[in-house]
Amino acid sequence: MSNVIDWAKAHPRLSAWMLLAVGMVAIITYEARDVGLLWGQWAALIIATIAVAALCVWIISWEDEEETEAVESE
């Protein structure tokens, strides 16, 4: 268990992306379970959801980069 925690601390953006993607896919799967999607549609929906999670983490990381640049300029 400590190996997982060490890895998450070493790669915070990647671990945030994975955790957010799992949560978003779980919510999408639960909400769309009775819609009657085909397997290809499910695959496209899950891939799009994972991509949106990646974009969310990337956009949130912009603030971290701005803070780092501000500290370095001082």
Image (cartoon, grey):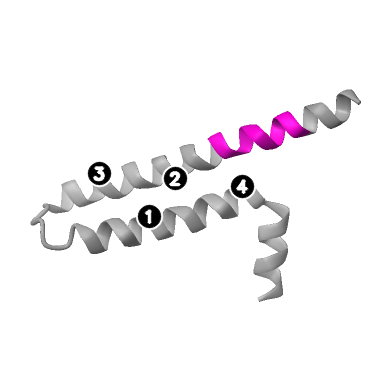
Q: Which residue in the structure is indicated by mark 2? A: 53
Query: Amino acid under label 1?
Result: Met
Whether residue 20 is in magenta: the answer is no
* Quadrant of the frame with the N terminus: bottom right
Circle 1: element type: helix
The stretch of residues the image draws in magenta is 59-67
**Between discs 2 and 1, the one toward the N terminus:** 1
The picture places residue 74, in percent across and down from the top left corner, at 91, 26
Q: Which residue in the structure is indicated by mark 4? A: 13
**Between discs 4 and 3, the one toward the N terminus:** 4
Quote the CA–CA distance across marks 2 and 1. Answer: 8 Å
The picture places residue 71, in percent across and down from the top left corner, at 85, 31
Instruction: Using residue 19 as the reference point, say whether residue 65 is left or right of it.
Output: right
Q: Which residue in the structure is indicated by mark 3? A: 44
Quote the CA–CA distance across marks 2 and 3. Answer: 14 Å
User: Is 23 placed above or below 55 here?
Assistant: below
Q: Which residue in the structure is indicated by mark 1? A: 24
Query: Amino acid under label 2?
Result: Ala
Quote the CA–CA distance across marks 3 and 1. Answer: 14 Å
Quote the CA–CA distance across marks 4 and 3. Answer: 24 Å
The picture places residue 61, in percent across and down from the top left corner, at 62, 38
- Residue drawn at the location 11% of the way across and 62% of the way down: 34
Quote the CA–CA distance across marks 2 and 4. Answer: 11 Å
**Between discs 3 and 1, the one toward the N terminus:** 1
Label 2 close to label 1 by CB (< 8 Å): yes
